[in-house]
Image (spheres, grey):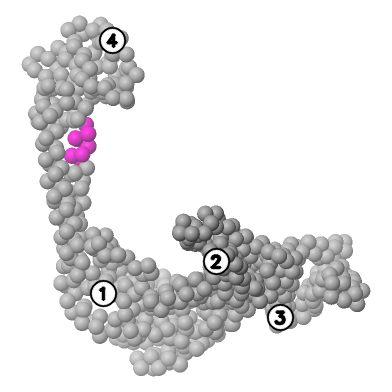
Amino acid sequence: MSIVKMEKLSVIGMDSVKNSLLAELMDMESVQLRSPSEFAPKEAEGAEEGSGQRTEKIAELESKINDAELALTVLGKYSGAKSPLFATRRILHRDDLAQVMEERRKIEGDVNTVLGINLMLHRLREKKNKRMTELSAVRPWMNYDLPLELEGTKMCDITLGVLPSAVDMSALTEEVLKKSERADLKEVNRDKDLIYVAMLTLKGETEGALEVLRQSGFMESKFKGLHGKPDECEKFLEKSIEKLDEGISKAEKDIAAKYGYREGIECLHDQLVIERDREKARENLLSTRRTFSLEGWIPEVCIKKAVRVLTKYGCWFEFNDPEEGEEPPVVLKNRSMAYPFESITEMYSLPAYGTVDPTGIMAPFYAVFFGMMLSDAGYGIILTLATYIILKKFNLEGMTYRMMKMFFYCGISTVFWGAMFGGWFGDFVTVASRTFLGKEITIDPVWFNPLDDPITLLIFSIALGIVHLFIGMGIQASELIKSGHKWDAVFDIFSWYMVITGLVMWMGGSQVSQALVKPGMYVTIAGAAILLLTGGRKKKGIGKITGGLGALYNVTSYASDILSYSRLLALGLATGVIAQVVNTVGTLAGGGVKGAIIMVLAFFIGHTFNLAINALGAFVHTSRLQYIEFFGKFYEDGGEEFTPLRRNTKYIKLSDDTDGGVRK
């Protein structure tokens, strides 16, 4: 349980080895470069020569990366290949990648081929959408017996358009005739929203008639590019759409046929990412014509390897402790059992550098709390087996791996607590045997059944919560003592140990022994007196009195924190009760074939729902107990994540990748 100690690395080297050194630092994955503006702001103002060209190079690489990414997306979309449950990187040796990249121009051509077909496909779909829109516009005009492109004769104008369906056509026709006595307004078609009308007017009278129509919401219809009567246009459009569909289908098949390009494009994508990141890394260097300098952060455990690399390239270098005011990045380092639970810590926020990493202590409590909340051995077996199979089948990495490994441990904990409480898919064994065998077969709990004795589980949950809180308070006290504030630890932490322990003995000690009651009262009073007398020690005047009262008033906060652990009881009972309800529903049809079918359906549907909803609840509420009750006692967050120079590949993982001694 620790935060890896960081050292500040300073390097000066010859410009001729710069690119090779950056490549090896990327292989090490152990150095986070600092921006020149951080360690040499004045020198950074005169940025390295060629920075403009480098920016253009980065932009060019970004464009190629985006093209490769789009090509892969297109191939995946039309290939018909099923996406894996978990996306994992393909393992490839560095020499194999170099061999693939010998055909880089061909692969870039493959990208252009896929994108070209995709562009053609996009245009075909645009044309189809346009034709579909035109077809929808033409179909209401099937009763119109003139060519749609005809807009009039030498003496007359023909105007087509639509009116709202609520318009009174008789009244509107009369209004039009007032403007143009020789106008002819006809209704061609009607639906629930619109009236399709054609109007014939003498030239010179058209605008007056249109003015009347527009006052009623008239919108003119144009059919640009279409020729012939509506039924002829309909046939033309349908045939055009059919041809476009054929073109679209062919283009999709052409893309699917190019699926074999995928592996090469994946290699190209990740090679481009490596090159882009290397170019970006050069932005963190200060250079002259012949030399360069850099600064960065490196974990102390990786220094020996860095020395070998830097010596190899003849660089001058030194390592220094962080100066006051500097904030080194944070890397967590925990034992293998606690390592998966780093995901919970990181979901909250990384601890500040130089403070405590709580993961090692939090891990066993997290697993225990999760198991108590889910509290069914059957569900625990499913969770354990499912995560075990996923971990074996998929080469998971990073956060996904840690979360899956964490749930594996939580599944084991759930099996343990389920056995302790007698939950095996609720009371399924008892209910099924009674319904189908005519006799009860029971699996007795190793400890007790919380549904029969919830008070015992409540007391145990509260006791476990107090231990959890006391450890958090102990960490805070330890940090205070380390920083030279031992009396703060005594007055602000140990006094609360006395108050809480004393109250437990005073209020509940009689359940164990009457002899605990009176000592508990004295311990409580002594702890309260310390708080009252010392709570305002850092204040002046009347604040010394009110400060003590305020410190003592915090007993309500501690009581609230302790009661929060009753959720261990609540969620555990919820799992058991829902499981029993599911089993009861499964017996409603009685025995026999019909009853067996109902029982199986109820079992799979009901218990799947119960497992899903209560596993989610256990995850959320267990995390809450860590974040609010436990972390709230000592945790200092705000740490910056360690982001070393590395190959940030997405599709391939080079088989000789190392982590430089830092597991991330």
The vertical placement of 140 against 295, above or below, is: above
Kindly identify the residue that appears in the image at 11 percent across and 35 percent down. 235
Q: Nearer the viewer, residue 11 or 613?
A: 613
Task: Give the residue type that dot 4 points to.
Answer: Ser
Label for residue 170?
A: 4
Residue drawn at x 60%, y 80% is 360
Residue 109 picture location, percent across and down: 16, 67
Looking at the image, residue 175 sits to the left or right of residue 626; the answer is left
Three-letter amino acid code at disc 2? Leu
| Numbered disc in front, either 3 or 4 | 4
Between the C-alphas of marks 1 and 3, the distance is: 51 Å
Q: Mark 1 sits on what residue?
A: 267
The residue beneath circle 3 is 478
Contact between labelled residues 1 and 4, with CB atoms less than 8 Å apart: no
Residue 246 visible in this rendered orientation of the protein: yes
| Mark 2, residue position | 437
